[in-house]
Image: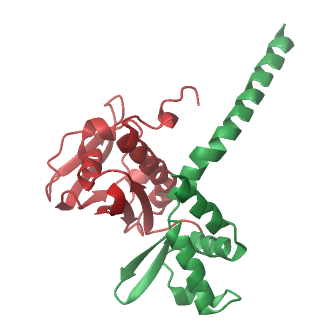
Chain colours: A red, B green
Amino acid sequence: MIGVQTTQVYQIFIKASPERVWEAITNPQMVAQYFFGTQMEKSTFAVGSSVRSWSPDRKTLWTDNTVLESSPPRKLVHTWRSLYDKELASEAESRVTWEIEPQEGGYSKLTVIHDRLEGALKTAANVSGGWTLILSGLKTLVETGHPLTVFGRSGT
Amino acid sequence: MSDDDDRVFKALADRARRRLLDRLFEREGRTLTELASKMAMTRFGVMKHLRVLEEAGLIVTRRSGREKLHFLNPVPIRLIHDRWIDKYTESRVSALARLKAQLEERGTA
């Protein structure tokens, strides 16, 4: 399939310390403000621990991922399965890596790599637009303290 | 960050660089050799364009063994979209939506 990538890389510069970026990725209250309103359960983010996220009304399990690698505040690797959609949920597990590198001028470079998508081509097509929106929202939240307006718009 | 916007717009204002982005959209994780193969320019020329794209954040390179692979990074285009395109298209779309609502109201009256 043209345009469907089994290794996807997303990168963004955020004016914040790696610690603040790590917090935005792991703090459920912050995650809810840029990740489609998802309600994430508290997790230790230690290797082997699970990270479960629910729909905004907490009725549907959206993801139930396992932490594969964890070195706060620089790197987090976890499995990915798209439980939010029946068709995608049946696809094979893939992998998400978050890398945070401090930059000059008080910036952090956040890179998200979603790979091992060979057995999950529908997920690959589904997440590509989502990650850009999520990272754009994460940046806005960390830099301004407010969520990106796109999530607040009603009726669209 | 307007400096970043400048870099993105400048990087996009070149046909060869847009072609390189399109080739990465078709399939990512390509090497310089692969990317240079169908371009009507020298390997050095392609390298220069890739550097401009990388500095603008439009591509990200990652090492895989001895190879340097190039990936498309769609995030800066998203930020440009949020900052520039959404702003202008939204008002037009809502103006059209208003017009539609008015015409429909009139139609039922």
- Nearest the camera: B99 or B41? B41
Say whether residue A107 is visible.
no
Q: Position of residue B14 (x, y in %)?
A: 70, 71
Q: Quadrant of the C terminus of chain A?
A: top right
Q: Quadrant of residue B96?
A: top right
Q: Quadrant of residue B35?
A: bottom right
Q: Residue at x 26, y 53 (%)?
A: A65
- Nearest the camera: B52 or B95? B52
- Nearest the camera: A110 or A52? A110
Q: Position of residue A53 (x, y in %)?
A: 29, 42
Quick check: A91 above or below B69? above
Q: Position of residue B21 (x, y in %)?
A: 61, 71
Q: Position of residue A36 (x, y in %)?
A: 42, 39
Q: In the drawing, does residue A116 fall left or right of residue B8?
A: left
Say whether residue B8 is visible.
yes
Q: Tell which residue pokes out farthest to the top in this image.
A: B109
- Nearest the camera: A89 or A96? A96
Q: Residue at x 49, y 58 (%)?
A: A122
Quick check: A65 above or below B64? above
Q: In the drawing, does residue A53 fall left or right of residue A121?
A: left
